Amino acid sequence: MSYDKHSLKAEDFINHDEILDTLRFADEHRTDTAMLSEILEKGALCKGLTHREAALLLSAEDPEIRRRTADLARQIKLRFYGKRIVLFAPLYLSNYCVNGCTYCPYHAKNKTIPRRKLTQEEIRDEVIALQDMGHKRLALETGEHPLLNPIEYVLESIKTIYGIRHKNGAIRRVNVNIAATTVENYRKLHDAGIGTYILFQETYHKENYEKLHPKGPKSDYAYHTEAMDRAMEGGIDDVGLGVLFGLNTYMYDFTGLMMHAEHLEAVHGVGPHTISVPRICPADDVSVGDFPDAVPDETFLHLIAVARIAVPYTGIIVSTREKEDVRKKALEAGVSQISGGSRTTVGGYADEVSAEHSEQFEVSDHRTLDEVIKWLLDEGHIPSFCTACYREGRTGDRFMQLCKNGQIANCCGPNALLTLQEYASDYASEETREAAEEMIREQIPGIPNPKTRAIATERLTAIREEGKRDFRF
């Protein structure tokens, strides 16, 4: 089998020999300053990098090259996303699972973790708790269990979530992170109005993948890896990639991740809407010591910066797996989305005590959403709860075209301020509200289009003084 990014077969577009050749190339040229400088110059054009160029840049150890990489990543993030940081929260529906994933405490053989599946009424309680925090965007999570967690349960849960209105709260976008499934089921998810379909590859190394997934439907490497193609065939425009760094060598998995992004662009004309970069961390029945390829902080931050340069338009996500100081540096390296106030337990928002000991992984950032918002504001970022693109039909190739030519900022900037004002008016502590409204006052004059600026100003007043909600450009 040879490498072919246009193929629909996993072992063609994530070709093992091509990855090994790429890693040899990167190792041979990692000290070639001239070649690395050329790659950075290409990256500065904001057209992205090939997987081989990205792997070489990731392998660079020269401090000056790394500094230039970090600087360029910061500039590209600002060009495409400005100072905006989108916020979301995971919502775990069920931890029943039939798979045998050795790195996840939900695996079928784990007899110590409390098992739970939320009823629709319990989901309602969870969503109200999330709305009372101020969240507008959720990432739905569930273990893979064909009998207990069928697609019908997921669809019913999505309908429940979208239907809940509590005070001024509303979940406006439900992203879905569930197991690889059929084209027919992806069509059902599309028709249910999901935002992004997210699926982590975990590792692109086929042999290691099969060792890490010894039983269950997820053990089928090809079916799992080809899921995004089926999702797009099923009408889902926006998909999110990711690997769990530390399961395998980071160089191999990063190269595979870049190849997957190239494949989606080549076949569907739309690259990944998001790329997630979680690292292995402790959990019930899982020890980090069992995974010798864990990625150190400095390498992790360099990896994020290279991803930002290689796939400049994508949203890069870091969760509460990471500690506050790492998240701060990751934002500078190119991250554009983070979770806040997260619980990785089933039922953990409405009744954290009863959900104890059922978390999928240990949360490292335990701050409340309000504390995270205040922190972002203090760091000069603009917290955003915007979901406008999804609801205005700016998805898939339409979103990518607007993002790549920079026009999306004409919508995203004002929308971020409008949703920040909603948060400030409805949920913020007094200190956070004052900081948010000061940020809004500072940013309004920077809206380039005078008409848009005037409309945004009117709408901000309507939110503050008239109680109106859910404006969007």
Image (cartoon, helix red, strand yellow):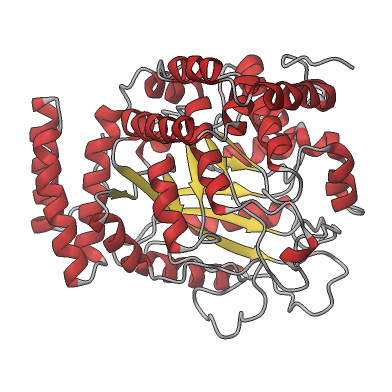
Between 129 and 314, the one nearer to me in the picture: 314
Q: Quadrant of residue 392?
A: top left
* 290 lies left or right of 341: right
User: Which residue is the extreme one toward the bottom?
Assistant: 353
Residue at 36 percent of width and 67 percent of height: 133
Between 137 and 171, the one nearer to me in the picture: 137
The spot of residue 208 in percent (x, y) is 86, 44
Residue at 64 percent of width and 66 percent of height: 361
Residue at 68 percent of width and 66 percent of height: 94
The spot of residue 26 in percent (x, y) is 68, 25
Between 415 and 207, the one nearer to me in the picture: 207
Residue at 65 percent of width and 40 percent of height: 188
Q: Is residue 198 above or below residue 166?
A: above
In this rendering, does residue 326 appear at all?
A: yes
In this rendering, does residue 163 appear at all?
A: no
* 315 lies left or right of 464: right
Q: Is residue 158 above or below residue 255?
A: below
The spot of residue 337 in percent (x, y) is 43, 46
Q: Is residue 308 above or below residue 243?
A: above
Q: Is residue 16 above or below residue 125?
A: above
